[in-house]
Image (cartoon, rainbow, N blue to C red):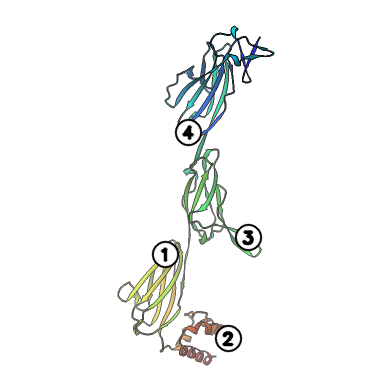
Amino acid sequence: MRTAFNEGFPIYSFGPKFIAPVENQTAAIGREVTFSCSVSNIGKFKVGWLRASDKMIISLHTKTVIQNDRIAIKYEPIFIPKKKLVSNNYSVNEDSQKSNDVVNGTWRLIIRQLKETDRGCYMCQINTSPMISQLGCLDILVSPDILNNETSTDISVVEGENATLVCKAIGRPSPRIFWKREDGHPILLRTILLNGINFIPVPIFNSSNLELYRIDRKQMGTYLCIASNDVHPAVSKRVTLSVNFLPNIQALNQLLGAPLGTDVILECNVEAYPNTVNYWFKNPNGMLLDGSKYSIEEKRDGYKVAMRLTIKRFHKEDIGSYSCISSNSLGKVEGISRLYKIGEFDGHSLMHESHHISILAGLAEAARDSDTKSSISLNSSVRCFKSYNYTLLLILLRNYFSER
C-alpha cells in the first residue's frame, strides 16, 4: 500500500480519511456553535451528521435533512495541488496522477440560538464499509435561576429567636450563592468572645443558608440572595427579615424650663416593631392634637421613630407633665417630661415628686440613696444643670440639704 502525506496528514489512495478530530464545544444558551469535520479523499462517498443519542440524521453530504431552522450545514472544499503530494522516500509522478487536483473538504454543522435540549454529542460519519465516524460533544452553559419554592420568603421573628434564610439556585455550572444586605450595611453575625457575646460585621456571607442566632433588632432589614456562575446574568432575590419587639421609649427632656411666650419643644425617641401608634398626652387635659396650639411631628427611620411636640406661645396653663406614648401589638410604653416656668420654679415640690420624675443625670435617685451616693449623684446633677439659670440651681441645693 502506498501512502502520500499532505501537510503531515496521511492521504490513502484507496479511501477517505478524517484529517482532524471533531472538537468538543461549550457555549451558553442563545449562542451559536460550529462543529467541523474535515475529510480527505472523499471520492464517491458521502459525509453525514447525526445526533449520537438517538442516531437521528441531521444532514447528508451538503443537504440538511432535519426540519429545524436553527441548524445548517456548510461545505467548504479544499483543493490541494498535486505537486505537494509526496510519499516516503520517493516523489509521486505527476503524470501518473489524474489531471484534477486531489479534493479534501470540511463539513460544518452550525447550531444557532442554542437551547438546553441541544446538549449532547454529534457524530460526523462517512458511509464507507464499514462506516467510520468521529464524535464531538456540546455542553450548554445555563445562567443561574433561583428556585422560588425552595428559597425563603419574607420572614418575621420575635427578638431573641433564631432564624435561617435559605436560598436555592440551579444553573450550569452550579452557581455560587452568597448573601448581602440591600442597604449596603454589613451583615451582623453573633459570636462569643472572651468579653462576652458580640457581633462580627461581614460584607457578604458565602453560603446558601444564612443562620442567625438570637436575633437582635439591629439585624432587621432586607437581605439579597445572589446566585452567579459567570454565565450572565447573575440573579438575586430579596428576603425581608422583620424582628418584632416591645416598644422602647426615651424622653429626651425629662425636666424642662422655659420663659412665658416662647415656643417649647419636647422630644421622645421610640424603638419598636411592628410600627407603633404614637401620641402626646397632657395631664389632666388629655390627648394633644396638631393645630394652632400644638405642632406634632414624627420622623421614621426603620424601627426608630423621633417624636416632637412644639408648644406654641408657652402660657401658665401649659405648665405640667407631658407624656409621649407609643404602642403596638406587643405592648405600650410611656415617657414623661415635666415643663415649668423659669423664675417661678418650686424646688421643694420637685423633691417631693422625685419618686416619679427622672431629672437628667439622676437627681431623683440621689434623693433616695445613701449620703455618700447622694453626694456623688448630686455632683453629677450640678454639672448637668449648668445650662439652667443660676437661681434655679440655688433653690435645688437649698431644698436638697434642708431635707438631709
Gap in angstroms between the C-alphas marked 1 and 4: 49 Å
Tag 3's secondary structure? strand
Q: Are marks 3 and 1 in contact (CB under 8 Å)?
A: no
- Between 250 and 74, the one lying in front of the other is 74
Q: Nearer the viewer, mark 3 or mark 1?
A: 1
- For the point 47% across and 51% down, the residue is 239
Residue at the spot of label 1:
300
The part of the image, by quadrant, that contains residue 113 is top left
Provide the residue designation for mark 2.
375
Q: Where is residue 207 in the image (x, y as percent from the top left)?
A: 57, 48
Residue 94's quadrant in the figure? top right
Q: What residue type is labelled 2?
A: Ser
Q: Which of marks 1 and 4 is in front?
A: 4
Q: Report crowding for label 1: few under 14, some 14 to 19, many 20 or more residues within 10 A (C-alpha).
A: few
Query: Within 10 Å of the Cα at label 2, are there few (<14), some (14-19), or many (20+) other Cα atoms?
Result: some
| Amino acid tagged 1 | Arg
Q: Which of marks 3 and 4 is nearer the N terminus?
A: 4
What separation in Å lies between label 3 and label 4 (alpha carbons)? 51 Å
Q: Distance between the residues labelled 2 and 4?
A: 82 Å
Residue 284 versus residue 96: which sits nearer the camera?
A: 96
Residue tagged by mark 4?
31
Tag shown at residue 1: none
Q: Provide the residue designation for mark 3.
A: 192
